[in-house]
Image (cartoon, helix red, strand yellow):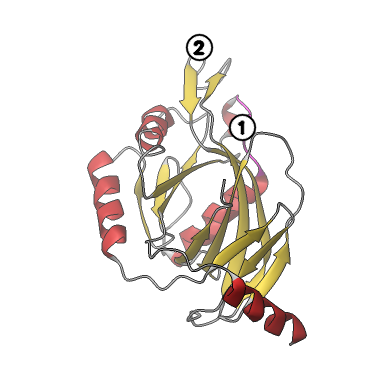
């Protein structure tokens, strides 16, 4: 109770930001061993520099058995995708898949469909909680309407640089695959139920990564808030 009161006082002391829409979050689930993922990587890379968009590339490991172990894949990335599979009533996870704002999905190779989902997301009503970073060690999430069942707060760290991966075996043998905004870490910080809450941030696993915090409906639900440290 005392922490919540202190946090509320802190928010009152902060300058009010200019009204702005939170960015549309575009998540690509891809794999270096997936023969059809190169085009999808390029489709998402073109979105990486567009204003009002946050493009994130999650590499999954379930195609590693085809002969090439994805150099960026982690089991927790595939687990995040599985939560969307259940929420969106899909039969199974697949690549390349794009999920927009946690509430709509399509194949990563369908440029027109991706663009439509982004346009639709831009028109959707928003009421995001305030998200404030204090240095590199703590983040505060403010109050807003909570979805039924509450929400979750996720820390994502990604590399904004283009990564050129030379694939030496498997279905993409001999190809060099460019990837942008490659996610290197995803951590569930904890629950959020519409009231102010603070979280400690773990140290970044490597230098040069960007940090973003997502507030999201539970178990692969809609993205409710997006926060990035002020440069």
The answer to which of marks 2 and 1 sits earlier in the sequence is 1
Of residues 143 and 63, the one nearer the viewer is 143
Magenta stretch in the rendered image: 68-74
Looking at the picture, does residue 206 appear above or below residue 19?
Answer: above
Mark 2 Cα-neighbour bin, 10 Å: few <14, some 14–19, many ≥20: few
Q: What secondary structure do most residues of the magenta stretch adopt?
A: loop
Of residues 118 and 90, the one nearer the viewer is 118
Looking at the picture, does residue 51 appear above or below residue 40?
Answer: below
The nearer-to-camera label among 2 and 1 is 2
Of residues 23 and 28, the one nearer the viewer is 23
Kindly identify which residue carries mark 1: 65
Residue drawn at point x = 49 percent, y = 69 percent:
16
Is label 1 in a helix, a strand or a loop? helix
Pinpoint residue 34: horizontal percent, then vertical percent: 48, 31
Q: Which mark is residue 82?
A: none
Kindly identify which residue carries mark 2: 174
Residue drawn at point x = 51 percent, y = 80 percent:
146
Verify whether residue 73 appears in magenta. yes
Task: Work out which quarter of the rendered image holds the N terminus and state it.
Answer: bottom right
Snapshot quadrant of residue 83: bottom right
* Residue extending furthest toward the top: 174
* Residue extending furthest toward the bottom: 1
Pinpoint residue 195: horizontal percent, then vertical percent: 60, 81
Is label 2 in a helix, a strand or a loop? loop
Residue drawn at point x = 37 percent, y = 70 percent:
126
Pinpoint residue 202: horizontal percent, then vertical percent: 76, 53
Residue drawn at point x = 73 percent, y = 44 percent:
204
Pinpoint residue 51: horizontal percent, then vertical percent: 36, 45
Left or right relative to 31: residue 211: right
How much space separates mark 2 and mark 1, taking CA atoms? 18 Å
Verify whether residue 39 appears in magenta. no
């Amino acid at each position: 109770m005392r922490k919540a009161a202190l946090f509320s006082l802190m928010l009152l002391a902060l300058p009010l930001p200019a009204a702005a829409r939170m960015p549309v979050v575009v998540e690509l689930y891809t794999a270096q061993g997936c023969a059809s993922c190169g085009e999808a990587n390029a489709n998402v890379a073109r979105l990486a520099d567009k204003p009002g968009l946050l493009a994130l590339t999650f590499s999954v490991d379930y195609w590693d058995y085809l002969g090439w172990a994805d150099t960026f894949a982690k089991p927790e990335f595939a687990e995040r995708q599985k939560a969307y599979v259940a929420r969106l009533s899909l039969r199974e996870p697949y690549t390349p898949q794009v999920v927009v704002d946690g509430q709509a999905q399509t194949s990563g190779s369908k440029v027109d469909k991706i663009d439509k989902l982004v346009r639709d997301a831009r028109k959707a009503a928003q009421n995001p909680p305030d998200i404030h970073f204090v240095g590199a060690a703590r983040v505060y999430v403010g109050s807003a309407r909570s979805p039924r069942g509450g929400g979750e707060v996720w820390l994502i760290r990604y590399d904004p640089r283009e990564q050129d991966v030379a694939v030496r075996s498997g279905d993409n043998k001999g190809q060099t695959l460019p990837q942008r905004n490659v996610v290197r870490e995803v951590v569930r910080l904890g629950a959020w139920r519409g009231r102010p809450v603070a979280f400690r941030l773990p140290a970044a696993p490597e230098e040069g990564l960007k940090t973003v915090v997502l507030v999201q409906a539970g178990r692969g639900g809609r993205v409710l808030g997006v926060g990035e440290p002020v440069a």
